[in-house]
Image (cartoon, helix red, strand yellow):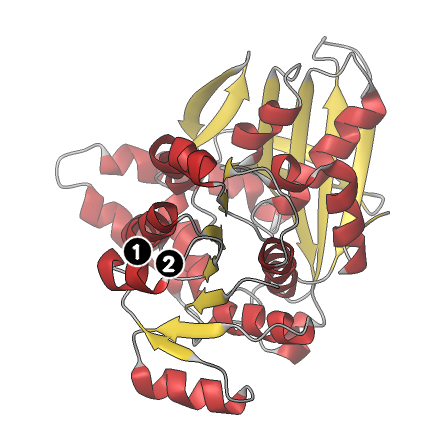
Amino acid sequence: MSSRVILLGATGYTGGLVLDALLRRGLDPTVAGRDRAALTALAQRSGGLDHLVVDAVDPAPLRGHLDRGDVLVTTVGPFERFGHPVAQAAAEAGAHYVDSTGEVGFVRALRARHHERARERGAVMLPAFGYDYVPGLLAGALAAREGGDTVRTLDIGYFAAGPLRRGISQGTRATMRDGLTLPSPRLHRRRLVDERTASRVRRFTVGGRRGSAFLVSGTEVLFLPDTLPDLADITVHNGWFAALSRPVSLFSALANTLVRLPKGAPVAAALTRPLLFGPPGGPDAALRARITSHVVAVASTGTAGDPPAAEVHLAGPDPYGLTGELMAWAADRLANGSGATPGVVGALEAFGLDPLRDACAGIGLRAV
């Protein structure tokens, strides 16, 4: 018998995509959030689902609704502001947990606070289980396996094609803006080091064309060493707007200088405010259908002058649709007792490389 799935944030943009994906898999989740009227209407439109009124900032009521073995899926962000009470409730209850965060600092905090408790309770906690950052984990592991025992370095790049300027959600715009003045961790000589976001720019070949991408945060630096301990260096890059990579690097340097000056933070906030401009919510189905995602992982020995040992490319649907499908797949597996590894873990440690590869192929993310 499958466990109960509770979807927190179901009335939001990403939550709606996850709900649709869960329903397509034949699951009937309990939809949860703080807006009673919106939840009631959503539950009725979705075939009479159960609904639960809870506030993400207060873990006590949510904890009271969770049982050991339940699956709590949450899309309520920013996670540094709203995610910690939700994760705490799941850990205390021994419930499985899946979230859509792209905030690596939040993921690091979850590992520090809840990993041992989750292991003791047999709970699987899967932060950042969407486009951020499952494709990079998969591509990196495949490239490392293909490259063989000499691989020590991975460079991972996220790219997308289509009408991206109109195809970015409000949440993504906020994360991008905040990320410019937050450090991005890299794995360097087997140690995590924090560097200025966009301080590095690297070129990748995608679809036969060269494109630039800049340094960003990614959970690949946290989770890949758990399954690939020989890796010494991992760097994650974003190339959504390849032509702007070097200007973004300069802009990041200016913003980070300003926030360190007396009274400079308001100036930096004003300079980065245009990144928030755009419609609420996110791209609709018609617009998403015109956007594709592409992730590349380049594995090398780490020795200067050596050619790449392997290069893996994965292409798939738009990032938001992909996130909904990935989270629904993970929730389905957990609800039906997949035997995944407990603790605050990444996709590879939880499910294994080949099952993850096959699942991603099933939802359209395939090697090209």
Task: Tell me the number on the disc at residue 77.
Answer: 2
Camera-side residue of 3 and 72: 3
Q: Is residue 277 left or right of residue 132?
A: left
**Quarter of the view holding residue 171:** bottom left
Q: Is residue 2 left or right of residue 289?
A: left
In the image, residue 179 sits, relative to residue 322, either above or below, namely above
The residue lying at 47 percent from left, 35 percent from top is 119
Camera-side residue of 113 and 82: 113
Mark 1: which amino acid? Phe
Secondary structure of residue under mark 2: loop
In the image, residue 334 sits, relative to residue 16, either above or below, namely above
The residue lying at 79 percent from left, 13 percent from top is 149
Task: Tell me the number on the disc at residue 82.
Answer: 1
Secondary structure of residue under mark 1: helix
Mark 2: which amino acid? Gly
Residue situated furthest left in the rendering:
262
Contact, CB < 8 Å: mark 1 with mark 2? yes
N-terminal of the pair, mark 1 or mark 2, is: 2
Q: Position of residue 18 (x, y in %)?
A: 56, 68
Count how many numbered circles sit on residues in the image: 2
Q: Is residue 69 left or right of residue 349?
A: left
Crowding at dot 1, Cα within 10 Å, few <14 / some 14-19 / many 20+, comes out as some
Is residue 125 shown to the viewer in this render?
Answer: yes
Q: Position of residue 299 (x, y in %)?
A: 75, 24
Q: Position of residue 335 (x, y in %)?
A: 58, 59
Camera-side residue of 324 and 173: 324
Q: Quadrant of the N terminus?
A: bottom right
Crowding at dot 2, Cα within 10 Å, few <14 / some 14-19 / many 20+, comes out as some
